Image (cartoon, helix red, strand yellow):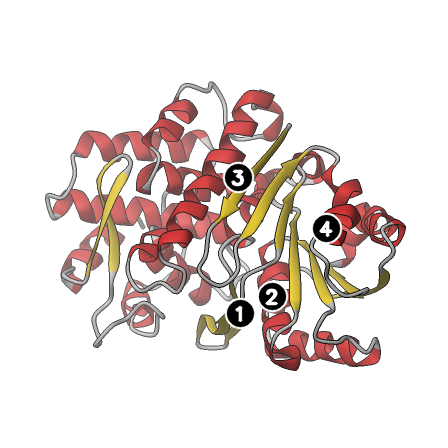
């Protein structure tokens, strides 16, 4: 399995390399970019235990001087306190402007490493080596970096594009089932917002709830089509002036649910699945798309083993309030991404709170 997808940007384009055994090629791939000799590998303890030594060996054999820093896994550690730890490591290892931070982990590690790289010495190189399906198809691509504020998700951050994204599908073999499903939520999202063919291919698969039920061909399609979709959208709108907002499909209500449950009850993908169900139902109620399409979306989410109801005890009014602190609020109005058909969506701020309440009540 080997393919390269180019993310074309005005300032600095880069490649997403999808390669089996890719971890062993990392050093050579980075060496080809002519970056400085110092590299700081950032990971979490569990991922580092699996893959850290291989990554470091690959970098060292390509002539890099490598140090490492580990941060605990989990959305609740995505804070400025963890960033401080990365700054301390950067200082201790005397990272320079030409140096590189390598994010080896899921979306949380990628977001934090990217933000540290964006702000250390006003911006140094960074490379994404995503180890979860969610990070491979979504979080690692597109240059959004950041951390959470106690009042909301990703409120502190910067746009800082990686120099390279390396996706090694074999890493998914050690991914827990729940994390695999979380990544599938973002894949379904691409099917709805951009790539109807991808959606149909998933519908045709018997089971999608575990990696072992996906044949290699389907996994390759999922990775390359999802990465291509994200690259297409980001290439057209790097800083979310317009089109890029469609990538937030399912995320508006999803982020509110994550925040309100303290990032401990549902993971990001599960929250997005719940948000997509809500957005789909809103679209039906506002007569933007057909009930039959919503049924197909619902069936695919269920086939992946993802939730379609709100977690117990989440207060609907608290969700409505939380929507107001979302980053996507413009002139006090919440912007929703709503589907028109499988493969196309629209962005609107004309969603009455009463409609949102009604849909959420049905999902309790």
Q: In the figure, is residue 165 to the left or right of 102?
A: left
Task: Decide which of tag 4 and tag 2 comes sooner along the chain.
Answer: 4
Mark 2–mark 3 Cα distance, whole angstroms, equals: 24 Å
Q: Work out whether mark 3 precedes mark 1 in sequence or the reverse, and give the earlier one.
A: 1
* Residue bearing mark 1: 146
Q: State yes or no: discs 1 and 2 in contact (Cβ < 8 Å).
A: yes
Instruction: Describe the element under mark 3 as helix, strand or loop.
Output: helix
Closer to the camera, 178 or 211? 211
Q: Which quadrant is home to the N terminus?
A: top right
Q: Nearer the viewer, mark 3 or mark 4?
A: 4
Which residue carries the number 3 mark?
181
Q: Residue at x 78, y 47 (%)?
A: 28
Can residue 306 be seen by looking at this rendering? no
Marks 2 and 3 close (CB-CB < 8 Å): no
Marks 1, 4: nearer the viewer: 4
Mark 3 or mark 4, which has the lower sequence index? 4
Location of mark 2 (residue): 114
Q: Earlier in the sequence, mark 1 or mark 2?
A: 2
Of badges 3 and 1, nearer the viewer stands 1
- Please give the label number shown on residue 32: 4
Residue depth check, mark 2 versus mark 3: number of the one nearer the observer: 2
């Amino acid at each position: 399995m080997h393919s390269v997808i180019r993310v074309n940007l005005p300032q600095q384009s880069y490649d997403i390399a999808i390669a089996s055994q890719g971890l062993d090629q990392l050093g050579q791939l980075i060496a080809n970019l002519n970056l400085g000799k110092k590299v700081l590998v950032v990971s979490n303890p569990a991922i580092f235990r699996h893959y850290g030594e291989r990554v470091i060996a690959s970098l060292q054999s390509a002539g890099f001087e490598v140090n490492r820093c580990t941060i605990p896994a989990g959305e609740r550690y995505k804070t400025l306190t963890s960033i401080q730890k990365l700054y301390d490591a950067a200082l201790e290892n005397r990272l320079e402007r030409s140096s590189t931070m390598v994010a080896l982990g899921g979306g949380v590690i990628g977001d934090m490493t990217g933000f540290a790289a964006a702000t250390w010495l006003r911006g140094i190189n960074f490379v994404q080596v995503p180890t979860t399906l969610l990070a491979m198809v979504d979080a690692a691509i597109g240059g959004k970096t950041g951390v959470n504020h106690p009042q909301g998700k990703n409120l502190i951050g910067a746009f800082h594009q990686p120099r390279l994204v390396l996706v090694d599908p074999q890493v998914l073999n050690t991914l827990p089932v729940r994390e695999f499903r979380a990544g599938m939520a973002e894949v379904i999202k691409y099917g709805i917002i951009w790539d109807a063919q991808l959606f149909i291919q998933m519908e045709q698969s018997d089971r999608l709830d575990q990696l072992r039920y996906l044949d290699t061909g389907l996994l390759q399609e999922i990775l390359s089509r999802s990465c291509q979709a994200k690259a297409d959208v980001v290439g057209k709108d790097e800083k979310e002036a317009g089109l890029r907002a469609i990538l937030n499909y399912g995320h508006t209500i999803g982020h509110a649910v994550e925040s309100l449950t303290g990032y401990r009850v549902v993971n990001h993908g599960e929250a997005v699945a719940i948000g997509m169900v809500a957005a789909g139902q809103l679209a039906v109620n506002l007569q933007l798309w057909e009930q039959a399409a919503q049924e197909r979306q619902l069936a695919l989410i269920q086939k992946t083993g993802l939730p379609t109801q709100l977690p117990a005890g989440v207060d609907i009014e608290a969700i409505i309030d939380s929507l107001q602190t979302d980053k996507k609020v413009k002139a006090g109005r919440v912007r929703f991404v709503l589907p028109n058909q499988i493969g196309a969506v629209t962005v609107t701020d004309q969603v009455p709170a009463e409609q949102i309440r009604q849909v959420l009540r049905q999902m309790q």
